[in-house]
């Protein structure tokens, strides 16, 4: 796949290049069925499954199988290691996937792509799995600038991102010794294998337990929804698969909105209407309905969850009555 830049070329018999060359298990690829790659385990797996359930992608995963067909939709979930999903999407093996921005950037750099020429498009930021990729060193060395570690031994699970980081620190030097490991990166310094490490930091508990601290941030990361760049060859510019990709985007975006907002409904006298509307302007504007009781109104609007209690307190002061705060299960905005 080295140097591959397009979608899914076809052979004379009409079989797609990606279907013929795919490393997917036999029978996974089907015409007009969208392949949606999902992390099979790891730190974002449970959050991703919650998003899919909330977005209405109902699929039962059989025991010991990494493929599940969605009910009532031509979408097949393929459960893969999160680190592999960006390559599967870029190489045309799956149509759309979810993984961390760190893993996507690592795969793009390794494949030799720049941001604007990679055969992948970011569809949505999912707001989960947020953490930082950091240069870490033993505590007694953390007062040094990151540039002091150029030329040292660095252990990481992200060799391409790490190389880019150190190349940016000292453009005239490329002698930093970067060693890739698949796990337990934080143990490398204590075992004498590294002078520093580049690893993900979420809470910092594991880092501190290993006697390390942050020297510098390399990258901020979160989970992304991304897809193959649509082309005529891969069939994602138009047609049933393109429609299904847009449906996936709309459903997930709608669910994510529902997790950030609540609907507040209240009643108020006409004299207080302007004040009440100013307290909850909504996404576009509040909905105002006249009540049967003369000069009374019902007002409703979306309010950010983080602001809902404060807004309700202010509504009481502003003359509102019968205030309700309702959770949202999904939206389409």
Image (cartoon, helix red, strand yellow):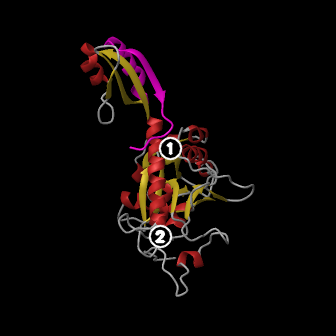
Q: Which residue is at a point 58% across and 75% down the rendered structure image?
A: 19
Image position of 37 with respect to 52: above or below: below
Q: Nearer the viewer, mark 1 or mark 2?
A: 1
The magenta region covers 305-333
Q: Residue furthest right?
A: 63
Q: Along the horizontal axis of the image, is 189 left or right of 136?
A: right
Q: Position of residue 93 (x, y in %)?
A: 55, 69
At label 2, counting other C-alpha atoms closer than 10 Å, the crowd grade (few under 14, some 14-19, many 20 or more) is some
Going by the image, does 233 lie left or right of 75? left
Work out which quarter of the rendered image holds the C terminus and state it.
top left
> From where the camera sits, is residue 126 visible?
yes
Q: Nearer the viewer, residue 271 or 87?
A: 271
Which x, y percent locates residue 205? 58, 37
Which residue is under mark 1? 128
Query: Which residue shows up at 64% across the image and 68% down it?
Result: 28
Q: Residue 186: x, y in percent?
A: 59, 48
What residue is pinned by disc 2?
111
The magenta stretch spans residue 141: no
Q: How many C-alpha atoms fall within 10 Å of the one at disc 1: few (<14), some, or many (≥20)?
A: some
């Amino acid at each position: 796949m080295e140097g591959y830049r397009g979608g899914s070329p076809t052979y004379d018999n009409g079989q797609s290049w990606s279907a013929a060359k795919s490393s997917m298990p036999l029978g996974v690829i089907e015409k007009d069925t969208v392949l949606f790659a999902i992390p099979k385990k790891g730190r974002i797996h449970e959050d991703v499954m919650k998003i899919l359930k909330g977005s209405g992608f109902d699929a039962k995963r059989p025991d010991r199988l990494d493929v599940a067909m969605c009910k009532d939709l031509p979408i097949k979930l393929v459960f893969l290691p999160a680190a592999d999903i960006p390559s599967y999407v870029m190489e045309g093996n799956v149509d759309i996937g979810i993984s961390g921005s760190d893993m996507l950037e690592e795969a793009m750099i390794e494949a030799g792509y720049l941001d604007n020429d990679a055969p992948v498009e970011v569809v949505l930021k999912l707001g989960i799995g947020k953490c930082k990729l950091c240069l870490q060193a033993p505590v007694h060395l953390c007062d040094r600038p990151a540039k002091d570690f150029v030329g040292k031994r660095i252990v990481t699970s992200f060799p391409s991102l790490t190389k880019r980081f150190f190349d940016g620190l000292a453009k005239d030097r490329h002698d930093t010794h970067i060693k890739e490991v698949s796990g337990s990166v934080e143990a490398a310094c204590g075992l004498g294998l590294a002078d520093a490490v580049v690893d993900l930091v979420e809470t910092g508990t594991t880092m501190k337990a290993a006697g390390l601290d942050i020297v510098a941030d390399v990258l901020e990361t979160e989970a992304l929804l991304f897809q193959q760049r649509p082309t005529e060859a891969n069939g994602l510019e138009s047609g049933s698969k393109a429609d299904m990709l847009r449906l996936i985007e709309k459903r997930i975006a709608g669910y994510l909105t529902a997790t950030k907002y609540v609907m507040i409904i209240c009643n108020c006298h006409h004299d207080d209407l302007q004040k009440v509307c100013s307290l909850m302007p909504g996404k576009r504007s509040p909905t105002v309905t006249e009540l049967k009781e003369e000069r009374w109104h019902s007002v409703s609007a979306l309010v950010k969850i983080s602001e809902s209690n404060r807004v309700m307190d202010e509504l009481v002061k502003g003359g509102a009555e019968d205030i309700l705060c309702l959770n949202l299960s999904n939206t389409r905005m």
